[in-house]
Amino acid sequence: MFHVPYRGSAPALTDLISGQVQVMFDLTASSIGYIRAGQLRALAVTTVKRSKALPELPTVGDFVPGYEASAVGGIGAPKGTPVEIIQKLNVEINAGLADPDVRSRYAALGSVPNPGSPADFGKLIADETEKWAKVIKFAGIKAE
């Protein structure tokens, strides 16, 4: 395969649908509408578990044991933001993520909200950084 860097999902999906490229790793939320409309054929999901939104799809890990790659999204604040503000934001964001309508919308897009504390998110970032650092080192990837 030849890697083609794109500036986002929209132009990459346009080229995929038109046949300019043959394969793409994309976020479910960006491509699920095209998959459901039959414009794209999804092959697998990269998460550990099958997607509830696309349960018929296997995981890449079914074919490549140990494979897992998930998108991580979160909300941050500038360094030095008062703890009280961080705590208030965390409470309100978690309340929003607990709302059934919000959870339903996430589910429809193939996403799973993961409410937690700022410490939980910091640990997730640290764990992901460590995981991908190993991949980068193993593959011999260097910054250009």
Image (spheres, grey):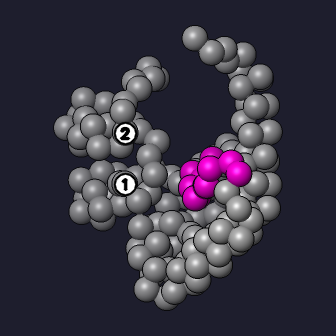
Residue 112 pos. (x, y %):
56, 69
Give the residue furthest to the left: 18
Mark 2 surroundings: few (<14), some (14-19) or many (≥20) residues within 10 A: few
According to the image, label 2 marks what residue? 8
**Relative to 115, residue 43 above or below:** above
The quarter of the picture where residue 76 lies is bottom right
Residue 77 lies in the magenta-colored region: yes
Tell me if residue 53 can be seen.
no
Residue at left offset 32%, top offset 37% = 12
Q: In which quarter of the image is the C terminus?
A: top right
The furthest residue to the top: 144
Whole-number angstrom distance, CA of label 1 to CA of label 2: 10 Å
Q: In which quarter of the image is residue 35?
A: bottom left
In the picture as drawn, the residue positioned furthest to the bottom comes out as 100
Residue at horizontal 44 percent and vertical 20 percent from the top: 2
Coordinates of residue 126 in the picture (x, y in percent): 78, 46
Look at the numbered disc 2 and give the secondary structure of its residue.
loop
Q: Nearer the viewer, residue 124 or 46?
A: 124
Query: Dot 1, how many residues are within 10 Å of its Cα: few (below 14), some (14-19), or many (20+)?
Result: some
Look at the picture and state if 24 lies above or below 142.
below
First to last magenta residue range: 69-80
Q: Is residue 12 visible?
A: yes
Residue 93 relative to residue 138: left or right: left
> Residue tagged by mark 1?
30
Q: What residue type is labelled 1?
A: Ser
